[in-house]
Each structure stands twice: as structure tokens, then as C-alpha cells.
Amino acid sequence: MTSRRTFLTSTLAVTGATLLPARLLHAASNLRFSSTPFTLGIASGYPTPDSVVLWTRLAPSPLEPGGGMPAEVVAVDWEIASDDRMKSVVQHGTAYATPDWAHSVHIEPAGLEPGRDYWYRFEAGGVRSAIGRTRTAPEYGAALARLRLGLVCCQHYEQGYFTAYRHMLADELDLIVHVGDYIYEGNSAHKVRSHNVPVAFTLEDYRARHALYRTDRDLANAHAASPWLVIWDDHDVSNDYAGDVSEDDDDPELFLARRAAAYQAYYEHMPLPRWAVPSGPAMRLYAERSFGDLASIVLLDQRQYRAPEACPPLGRAGGHRVDEDKCPELDAPERTMLGGRQEAWVQGHLASSQTRWNLLAQGTLMAYNNEAPLPQHRYWTDAWNGYPAARERLTRFLAERRISNPVVLSGDIHAFVVSGLHMKAADLNSPIIAPEFVTTSVSSDALPEQYFDTARKLNSNLLTATGEHRGYMRLDITKERLQADLIALETVKKPDSTRSTLISYVVEAGKAVPVPA
């Protein structure tokens, strides 16, 4: 049971000054910093027509326990302006950063104008942060001619530099969407740079990991330049976890304590709205944002609520390969990827959507990928191929309810993959319901290219599948079409790599098949 003290400190962290006693307010106002506490940068996210989340975390010594902060409540002033020099401040206020939440703050100003740029900054202890740019969403249903998105995932700090974000700044994006593996809880044998700490298990471990990643200047600059939407995948907690089941099949009580630590650190370091505040090992992350009459983006949490993976090897529970004829459990209709409540929420939102395009952003490959030649059927269980009934429920719903221009945006596999999603995945003669665009990793290593060569030969629905490149995907959306540019970096082993467009695909409105541009 949650104690009264735990409840009060949690509430304090998200309600601000209303519960702070006068002595704490006095202490908060007297603190002065000798160096900047904004080493982890600033960020914004989750825009609506009249608001956007503004984020920062105070950490003058970011890689030390507690970020080098005293165990005190600290006042953080914020202001948002209509110009990039902060001359025309339209709103300002004071938040109170508490040690219980790693001195992070999440500000949600209300009453902003829809569909316009704003600039913002913070001040604490006599020190100002850099200035960030953000943008509110257009009015619901308002005409919007164009939306430009960056799609990213899988950024292992040790395996490469985050140069992709440097190039994204030149794209002048309206929004960046991250579909998982923002951090990696484990360490790599092949290092370009080092975590310098063990595998993450505790709250302090996950805080330190997030802080290290946030010190990357390219990542920090991308957060300061555009609003973000985020959804997690496995490495944000632990490799290949499914609900309360870990890869090593730990005692669920033990694993849920680890999951609670990871979820809290995730919230502390992301520009997430107040409704996403975690309660122990539970955290509401699935969400939706609409951009005028043009596009709706639905973020799907396919980790927290999923059923355990089918037919695991003895003593393990993570991703593995199964032959369908030897694993009847695989096709059980009750097995879920999203959980019943989220699945109903997704269907309800999509059924009522009035936008031209409906984008589903989530972590893992949804495309059909049989890893054996016919008549065998062999699947990797950690993606949607391990949950075929759940996938078909979704594709059938999209088809039967005639959802307008659905597009699936995915990550995880460290490869560019472009495909058409059939209503019955294994029946390539069934109608294509939606395209799927899978972005490659920002820096994480890929499987050998031979794997993807074989996958294309065995699965004609995979139009592109290659793990040779690190990078990101750029999406340009108008009423008539969606264009996806697969942006490949020359290398992530040095920080000044060049980029090129590997290939571009176009989906015409009213059609579900992506074609090369």
C-alpha cells in the first residue's frame, strides 16, 4: 500500500508550490549556483492547440549521484515568449523542483495561440538556461497544408555518436517522434565511447544513464529545437521484457521493482504531460496528438501490457524463434500486444478521428516476416510476429472501419524496413491495409546484412529491408501524399559524418501501398 508520505511527496512533485510550506519556499528562493544547473538541456513536447510541455532537470554535476544537487526543493522560474530573443514574454511562472523527482520540472502553460512558434527558457539559482523553440498544434479540425516529422529510435551511446540529430536540425521539422530505446540499460562489447557504469537496475542507475545520454550535444540541441513525442521499447527498461516478465524470467516482484525505477527515470527525463506521472511500475504512456485536419499521431505502448512471449525456452522468457507448428500457443486469440484497455482506447480514437492521415507510432516491427522457407513458418517472438492474433485484430479493425489513411511507424530492428501490411499477415493475397515505415537506429549496431537479404527473399511484402545504415526517417505529409525519406549516415563511429537519402517512398492518399518516389 502507498504510504501517506510517499503520496504527499509524489503529489508535491507535480502540483508545485501549493503544498510547499513556507520554510521550503524560503530555502528554494535562497539557493545560488556557481555553475550552470542546466547541463542536461531543455526540451518541449506533446503540443496541443493551446499548450505544450516544457521540461528541464537541474543537475550541475550530471554524472554524480543526485546530479550534484542538494537534497532541497529548488525554485525554477520559467517564461515563454513569442519571439526568439525573449523580448515579448507571454507567460511566466515558478515551479519547484524536488529531489524525489531528480529536480526535474514539467511545465504546461495554458492559453497559448494555436499553430505558432514559441520560445522558452528557465532560470534557477541566478543562472539562466539556453533558449528553446517549440510549437503549438493547430486548432482541432483547422486546415493544415503540411507537417514534417523526424522518426528516430535505438540510440546506444556506446555504439556510436548521435550525429543523426545534427542533420535533423537542418530539416526544420515540426515534430520529432521517438519510438523507443532512448537509452540502453546494458553495456556493449564494441565501444566508440563508454557508459562507464554497470548495467542499470536501480533508480539511481537509470537516472545516471539518462543523464549521460542527455549530455550528448546533438541530442540536447534536437530537444531544444522542436517539440517531441515519445514511446518506449524494451531497452528503456530491460531487453525483451513483456509486461511483468523479464528476459531472464526473474521473480515478477523483483522485476516490477526494476521496472518502477526505469519508468520513474524515464518520466524525469522526458517532456511528458502531468498525466504520465508513474505510480510504481505503472505509467500511462499511450497517447494521441492531432495536427489540424491533416494528421493524428497515436502512440502505442507495446511493452507494458503485452502477454508473455509464446513457448519460451526453459529458464528464459525473452525473444526467441518458434516454429508455428510446434507452438500452438503462438496463435491463441487471447494473447495481446496492447492489453485490453489500450486496445479499446486505440479503436475508439481511430473510429472517431477526423484527420486525413492516422499515424500509429510504436516500437517493434509489425510487418510479416517469416524466417524460414515455405512450407515452414518460423517467427521472432519479440515483435508483432510473435502476437499474430493481436496484429490481425488491429488490421481487421483498420479495414472494416475504413480508417482514413492509416500508416504504421516503427523501430527496434536497427534497419530501414518498408512494407505493406496485409489484413491477414501470412496471406499476401489479402488486401494491403496500411504501409509500415520502420526507421533504422540512430547509432545501435545491426544484425548482419545477410539476415535482411534472406528476409527480402522469403517475404515479398518487404519492399526495403536493410541494416547497413544508421540514421533516421523524415516524413513530409500533405493532404495528397506522405513521403518518407530514408536518411542514411556515412558512419556513426565519428561525430562529423555526412548524410544522404538512401531512397524515398510515397503513399498517395487513399492508397495503402508505398511506392519509390
Image: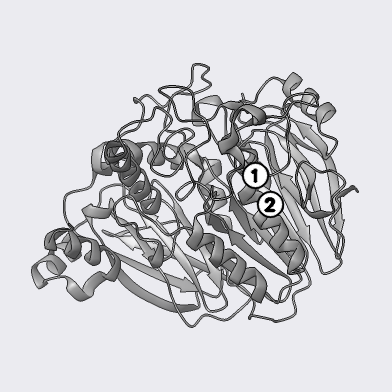
Residue 278 in the image: above or below residue 450: below
In percent of width and height, residue 299 lies at: 57, 58
Disc 2 and disc 1 in contact, CB within 8 angstroms: yes
Q: Which residue is mark 2?
A: 392
Identify the residue at image location x=49%, y=34%: 240
Q: Out of 334 and 485, give the one closest to the viewer.
A: 334
Badge 2: residue crowd in 10 Å (few <14, some 14–19, many ≥20): some
Identify the residue at image location x=77%, y=58%: 476
Residue 361 in the image: above or below residue 500: below
Circle 1 sits in a helix, a strand or a loop, which is it? helix
Task: Identify residue type, mark 2.
Answer: Glu
Q: Please say whether residue 193 is visible from this viewpoint.
A: yes
Identify the residue at image location x=39%, y=75%: 92
Q: Please say whether residue 132 is visible from this viewpoint.
A: no
Mark 2 and mark 1: span between their CA atoms?
6 Å
Q: Is residue 227 left or right of residue 379?
A: left
Residue 106 in the image: above or below residue 205: below
Identify the residue at image location x=32%, y=43%: 256
Circle 2 sits in a helix, a strand or a loop, which is it? helix
Q: Which mark is residue 388?
A: 1
